[in-house]
Image: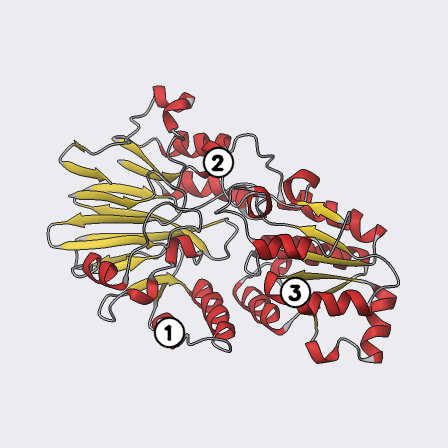
Amino acid sequence: MRITIYRGAHQIGGCITEIRSDNTKILIDLGANLPDSEEKELSEADVTELTQDVDAIFYTHYHGDHVGLFYFVPENVPQYIGRGAQEVMMCKYSALSKHQDCSKEISAIKSFHTYKSNVPIDIKGKIRVTPYYVSHSAFDAYMFKIEVEGKTIFHTGDFRKHGYLGSGLPKMLRAFIKNVDFLIIEGTMLGRREENTITENDIKHNTISLLKKHKYVFALCSSTDMDRLVSFYQACKETGRIFLCDPYQKSVLDVFTRCMEKDLFHFNNVFEIYKQCISSPKIVAKLSNEGFLMPVRVGQMELIKEMLEQYNDEPAYLVYSLWQGYYNGTEKQINPKIIELRKLFPNRILDGVYDGFHTSGHADVETLEEVCRIIRPKLGIIPIHKEALATYKSLGIAKKFNIVESSTRISNVDISIL
């Protein structure tokens, strides 16, 4: 048996993990590098070579740093993802297809196999993979229990406890995850301990306070972050403001509503607006009277400018609800379009983690340690999705568990960390 960390041990994102047993092999995630990565990205030829004898690829969720190379995978290799995640990806690429050729991506997404939480999938009688739903800033994200050659590997994917469904994480782990030999766990926040981690519910209450003071609010956020959109939507419901969005955002919200059982995640009272209707007298009267919050993306720059001109009886505010590095990070991290959009709201920005309108999609250090203590891996903890210099060996749990950060062999299991 062999565990290979192709990417992720020394960087955040671009994750690729291989688990092999005899003539059976699976990959967990096939992620693209983040924009600031120093690593050369894999080509289609590289992916074809990497996956030539792979029996299945399992994606933890739809973020590009975990699923980004999916369209390079040969058609004969089965790719698995959650049903809701598949639908969100289809929304994204259907929208992009109006501006560029996405036929290859759409064809690949349609061919995906889907899995369900707590329902095992058997690969050639050698490897069994069981997904477990987890809270993350991506909707429909999962952890995986992998059983192979009498050993159990648990792969966390990306996760957190401070989302709306995150409080159930310890209970789920104690109920279903036992006798783990190796824990493959993310460590994003190991290098960001100074970052303030608040709950999504905190963001909702901060948004309620904002909407009580200001009539027009734009929120720059991820269009597929269900929890964040719930925070904004619920704040609108409690203040009587209109939750406004464009057709693409509405299509994503419809996926959440269809897939989630809890009413909290049902977006049943959304005002969908089309660009050509911004100046409609009836719409202007309604929005001017009731006020609104509108989730926006950098690609909507011209739409935002038009709306700022039309709805100018009061100053509009911007909630910046993304990672701060996109505007104040390194040269490679900065997104010029985000800086341009922020300039439309001089001195009228509620700024992410600084003002209580953003929180990480990843577990804080205390939660990382808690998960390790609950699972109690017998043979080792293999950290991934972390900065190169960040280490689990700096935590108190390092005294109790074997932290595997370099290639080794443990109990007849070869571990390669590349």
Q: Are marks 3 and 1 in contact (CB under 8 Å)?
A: no
Considering the numbered disc 1 on the image, is that residue within a helix, a strand or a loop?
A: helix
Q: Report the Cα–Cα distance between label 2 and label 1.
A: 34 Å
Q: Position of residue 286 (x, y in %)?
A: 84, 72
User: Which kind of residue does numbered mark 2 sit on?
Assistant: Met
Where residue 177 sits, quadrant-wise, is top left
Disc 1 crowd, CA 10 A, few/some/many (<14, 14-19, 20+): few
Classify mark 2: residues with Cα within 10 Å, few (<14), some (14-19) or many (20+): many
Task: Say which of 288 and 364 sits in front.
Answer: 288
Residue 170 seen in the current view: yes
Q: Percent position (x, y) of residue 52?
A: 17, 61
Q: Element under label 3?
A: helix
Q: Give the labeled residue for mark 1.
A: 110
Q: Residue at 56% across / 56% down in the picture?
A: 225
Residue 281, percent across and down? 84, 79
Horizontal side, residue 145 vs residue 297: left or right: left
Quadrant position of residue 31: bottom left
Mark-to-mark CA distance, 3 and 1: 31 Å
Residue closest to the far front: 331
Up-down relation of residue 312 to residue 189 (above or below): below
Where does residue 30 sit, x and y in percent of width and height? 32, 55
Mark 2 sits on what residue?
Answer: 189
Q: Say whether disc 2 or disc 3 marks the residue closer to the N-terminus.
A: 2
The C terminus - image quarter: top left
Q: Please tell me which residue is depicted at 38% across the width and 77% down the height of the picture.
A: 103
Residue at mark 3? 301
Q: Is residue 165 left or right of residue 370?
A: right
Q: Earlier in the sequence, mark 2 or mark 1?
A: 1
